[in-house]
Image (cartoon, helix red, strand yellow):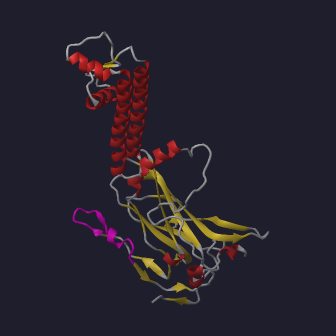
Amino acid sequence: RDTFLLFRKRKNFSRLVTKSGESNISNGRVTGPGTGTFVGIFTWLVDSKWRWTGLIFFASFYITWTLFAVLFWLICYSHGDFEMQDQGREGVNNGSVPCIENIRDFTSIFLFSLEIQTTIGFGFSRVTEQCGAAIFTLTVQAILGAIIEAFLVGVVFAKLVRTKQRAQAIAFSQFAIICQQDGQLSLMFRIADRHTSRIIGARIRATLVSQTRTTREGHVVTLDQQPLRVHPSGEDSDLLLLWPTTIVHSITVESPLYGMNEADITQAAFEIIVTLEGTTSSTDMSTQAMTSYLPTEILWGYRFDDMIGAKSDNGRPTVDHSLMDNIYPVATVRTTEDDGSEEFIPD
């Protein structure tokens, strides 16, 4: 089989997906639809922490209030409104109409700018019809203020309804293990849902991503992907996450791992990326959780401890999540194509 041309000796093969499910891929020189600055800022705000979103929320309003206050001040200064207001307070009326009535200094103009954008409209200051520049600036601020409010409301709504926090309640075992299951050597890892609301229609998918693979034509494929057939405890791929479940990949002749021993796996350059998708029962929204396993995180000849204990006083079985990563050694064949006649127990 030429499948294992892809399993070269490891050379600085850093993980593609972190244990918490974050991508380590860096995208550069991206162009085309959906890659603009506006989309990038929106996505960054949705994915960022609440403190940064709140800071941008407040800063955007104060910056626009101050910016348009400066514009209105320049318009009033060039039109001579401050001299008119001073003369009016001194009882002198030369018949001139200011651009903005009842403004005295920058503070009063800042309050006027705030009233425009927030549509408070106290009515004390107003733009007159004598100054086209002030009228145009007022309309621009009103439109821009509505756009900013809609944008920020969209960000807050997207953060509230996103399922990232729900996905963080899904736990994967720190290590994957290889041992015999029902007479078949199998790769296994464990998954548990620690949230009170349940995930319905859960599906699990595992993909083996190798650093390189050489095709029969001699072409080198970088980051080649091969699906791994997985099933929970010997059944199909539909998951019932009411309790922790062990996910099994049987290492048959069709498996990319077939024919390898413990040393081969430890020295290989690949990563197994696991994806769980389902629908949250409380919100009816889809959620996704990811993790990955490097060859050094695959332990040969071990089995997971049982997490489900004896029934409690009220008759319910108890799940001890502190045992999520507990393992113990078991007798296991030495290679993935061993007939089972030679076994070993790890130290």
Residue 226 visible in the displayed image: yes
Image x and y of residue 166, in percent: 39, 53
Name the foreground residue: 337 vs 118.
118
Return the residue found at the far right: 217
Q: Is residue 149 magenta?
A: no
Query: Is 238 displayed left or right of 80 in the figure?
Result: right
Residue 141 sits above or below residue 170 on the image: above
Q: Residue furthest left?
A: 90
The part of the chain drawn in magenta is: 310-326
Q: Nearer the viewer, residue 98 or 17?
A: 98
**Which quadrant is the N terminus positioned in?**
bottom right
Q: Residue 273 appears at what percent x and percent y? A: 54, 65
For the image, the number of numbered tags is: 0
User: Is 332 or 87 nearer to us in this picture?
Assistant: 87
Q: Nearer the viewer, residue 241 or 15?
A: 15
Farthest top residue in view? 95
Residue 139, quarter of picture: top left
For the question of whether residue 123 can be seen, the reply is no
Residue 258: x and y in percent read 63, 76
- Tell me what residue is drawn at x 63 percent, y 66 percent: 223
Q: Is residue 313 magenta?
A: yes
Residue shown at 34% from the left, 50% from the top: 50
Check the image and report above or below for 173 versus 34.
below
Horizontal side of 151 relative to 340 (left or right) equals left
On the image, the x and y values in percent for residue 253 come to 66, 74
Residue 321 higher or lower than 242, as above or below = below
Q: Is residue 224 above or below residue 9?
A: above
Give the image quarter of residue 170.
Answer: bottom left
Q: Quadrant of the C terminus?
A: bottom left
